[in-house]
Image (cartoon, rainbow, N blue to C red):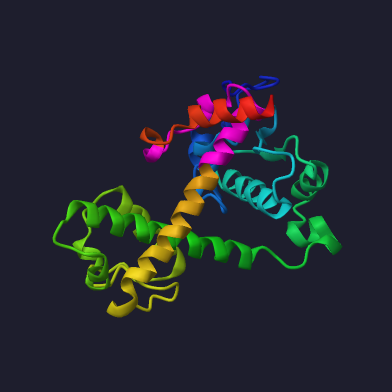
Amino acid sequence: MGTAVRSAPGEAPALLVLTEDDVLRALGAVIDPELDEPITDLGFVRSVRFTDDGLEVHLRLPTSFCAPNFAYLMASDAKDVLTALPDTGRVVVELDDHHDSDIINRGLAADAGYLGTFRHEAESDLDELRATFQRKAHTAAMERALTALLRARSDIEEQDVASVVLGDLPDDVAKEALLRRRQTLGLSIDDSEPVLVDDRGVPHPVASAALALRRARSTRISLDGNAHFCRGLLATRYPGSEADQTPRPEENFFPVSSLIRTTRRSVA
């Protein structure tokens, strides 16, 4: 992705204090709801350009037929976080190369919202969709933290995870991610709170703890698998875009580069 440029310098306005790094940091708060990763890590930010009166950002997705509701959600969230930055001027966010790009981009420009953008095609607003994937993200984060603890502690068995509390988890990235997702759901992050809970914060009983953890693992594996696949598809669709992707911790046993090669061979 190239550096940000201004189309017509003119007189130096306050906008000049905003840098491309500032823009990308803000966009890092925008999460692909299905993959539970920032769009910046996934390489979905195609370009950042400073214009004479504001800011223009283009997004790209792994395929032209990605679900319109997911596509709109990410593009709309991107516009929201950029508009919230100081001195951005006029913010334009456009989604490129999607089968509903024209509809989505018109809706974003008019601030029409999802229902106003898709009208009769939209069954409902996106709040429930967002909540559904926030719950899945919490489940996956919970499994990652507990599985890491099981690997580090030979004295803990799967059925013992029912008694594990937040204070038992090491202060690492897995715990940090879990705490963020608990806060998103409105769950307590007190050290005395049990880790293995449902979406409402209700603990799983000891008798079903191992089964609950395995179900959570299937959710996490699904998220991770989709993320790997979409990264490979993006790199196949936009050669070189893999350079804009942030490597995942799991890449040491399932590198995206091998998936890209496999995908390109199958496409050929």
Q: Looking at the image, which is closer to me, 20 or 32?
A: 32
Q: Is residue 182 left or right of residue 115?
A: left
The answer to which image quadrant residue 8 occupies is top right
Q: Looking at the image, which is closer to me, 204 or 202?
A: 204
Residue at the image point whose x is 62% and y is 68% from the top? 128
Q: Looking at the image, which is closer to me, 22 or 173?
A: 173
- Percent of width and height locating residue 139: 43, 63
- Percent of width and height locating residue 129: 62, 63
Q: Is residue 58 left or right of residue 150?
A: right
Does residue 28 show up magenta in the picture? no
Is 47 rendered above or below residue 139? Answer: above
Does residue 245 show up magenta in the picture? yes
Q: Which residues are magenta?
A: 228-250
The answer to which image quadrant residue 140 occupies is bottom left
Counting the numbered discs, the total is 0
In the current view of this chain or complex, which residue is farthest to the right? 120
The N terminus, quarter of image: top right
Q: Is any atom of residue 247 visible in this view?
A: yes
In the current view of this chain or complex, which residue is farthest to the left? 155
Is 262 rendered above or below residue 76? Answer: above
Q: Is any atom of residue 17 visible in this view?
A: no
User: What type of secondary structure mainly makes up the magenta span?
Assistant: helix
Q: Is residue 210 left or right of residue 248?
A: left
- Percent of width and height locating residue 186: 43, 70
The C terminus, quarter of image: top right
